[in-house]
Image (cartoon, grey):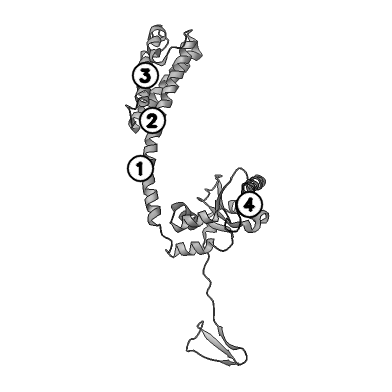
């Protein structure tokens, strides 16, 4: 055997020439360091996730493409959900209704036998996860960024490497989709405020009806509640005059929202209505308990 020097020393390349077997290359391989995200998860939570992943893989085998621990780190001394993503192979396996139902039943049993109070499992098809990564979906990106593969059949770690190298970027479709979701979310937030206004009205009207019934009155229609309160409870000084004003104000709010004349409630207005509704309910409760 003849050694052929190439001018490189130390840990450099050193080809070896063998007359019978030809040329072989002998060189040192530098291993890449693995991600250190495992350290971000407390040992107890990580071990629970590992036990769950092992049981799932033992049960389903190659049907599982990956099992990933993700989510925010667990704060010391506080029990949080242990978020785990299970990616299933829908390339080789056809997802029939029987298969899906069987998977759900077995998965629920595994969760129940492992840590039912804390394990929070999400399941996704392989093609769906791949598509989310392809378009740069923020949810998939965060799973790649912070996730730890407990089971990986060979696709999750490479995707993490591509993300680290900056080779996975959001597509134009993903940017457009998420941007157009923003106005819709704002609209929903406004609707939630209006719904809260209606809920506060019902709190007031229900409390008023209860108080009037306690006084021996037949519950009137909502538009007459304030008048009946003035003629009975307020006249007899059972409740304050302010309560009738609140009743009228909340009824006007309800009618305005219902007729779509009121299209938005500001945060300041919400706080005002909430305070008045709470004070009204407390006053009616005091009257009911006292009499």
Q: Crowding near pointer 2: few (<14 within 10 Å), some, many (20+)?
A: many
- The answer to whether mark 2 and mark 4 are in CB contact below 8 A is no
Residue depth check, mark 2 versus mark 3: number of the one nearer the observer: 2
Cα–Cα gap, marks 1 and 4: 40 Å
Q: Crowding near pointer 1: few (<14 within 10 Å), some, many (20+)?
A: few
Residue depth check, mark 2 versus mark 4: number of the one nearer the observer: 2
Pick whichever of labels 2 and 1 is earlier in the sequence.
1
Residue depth check, mark 1 versus mark 4: number of the one nearer the observer: 1
In-image side of 102 versus 162 (left or right): right
In-image side of 57 versus 242 (left or right): right
Q: Residue at x 51, y 84 (%)?
A: 13
- The answer to whether mark 3 and mark 1 are in CB contact below 8 A is no
Q: Nearer the viewer, residue 188 or 232?
A: 188
Residue denoted by label 4? 52
Residue denoted by label 2? 194
Cα–Cα gap, marks 2 and 1: 17 Å
Where residue 232 appears, x then y in whole percent?
Answer: 41, 7
Q: Quadrant of residue 184?
A: top left
Helix, strand or loop at label 3? It is helix
Residue 263 drawn above or below residue 226:
below
Cα–Cα gap, marks 2 and 3: 18 Å
Quarter in which the N terminus is drawn: bottom right
Residue denoted by label 3? 246
Residue denoted by label 1? 183
In-image side of 233 versus 49 (left or right): left
Q: Crowding near pointer 3: few (<14 within 10 Å), some, many (20+)?
A: some
Cα–Cα gap, marks 3 and 4: 55 Å
Helix, strand or loop at label 1? It is helix
């Amino acid at each position: 055997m003849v050694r052929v020097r190439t001018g490189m020393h130390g840990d450099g390349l050193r080809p070896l020439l063998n007359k019978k077997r030809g040329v072989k290359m002998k060189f040192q391989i530098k291993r890449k360091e693995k991600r250190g995200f495992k350290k971000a998860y407390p040992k107890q939570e990580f071990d629970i996730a590992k036990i769950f992943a092992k049981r799932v893989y033992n049960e389903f085998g190659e049907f599982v493409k990956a099992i990933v621990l993700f989510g925010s780190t667990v704060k010391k001394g506080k029990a949080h959900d242990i978020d785990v993503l299970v990616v299933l192979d829908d390339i080789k396996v056809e997802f029939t209704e029987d298969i899906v139902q069987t998977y759900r039943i077995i998965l629920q049993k595994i969760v129940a036998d492992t840590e039912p109070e804390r394990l929070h499992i999400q399941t996704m098809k392989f093609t769906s996860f791949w598509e989310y990564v392809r378009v740069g979906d923020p949810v998939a990106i965060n799973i790649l960024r912070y996730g730890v593969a407990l089971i990986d059949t060979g696709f999750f770690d490479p995707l993490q490497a591509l993300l680290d190298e900056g080779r996975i970027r959001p597509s134009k479709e993903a940017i457009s989709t998420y941007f157009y979701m923003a106005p819709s979310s704002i609209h929903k937030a406004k609707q939630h405020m209006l719904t809260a206004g209606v809920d506060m009205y019902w709190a007031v009207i229900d409390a008023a009806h209860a108080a009037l019934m306690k006084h021996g009155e037949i519950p009137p229609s909502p538009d007459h509640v304030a008048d009946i309160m003035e003629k009975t409870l307020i006249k007899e000084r059972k409740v304050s005059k302010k309560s009738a004003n609140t009743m009228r104000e909340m009824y006007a709010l309800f009618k305005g929202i219902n007729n779509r004349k009121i299209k938005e409630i500001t945060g300041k207005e919400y706080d005002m209505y909430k305070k008045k509704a709470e004070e009204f309910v407390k006053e009616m409760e005091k009257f009911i308990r006292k009499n």
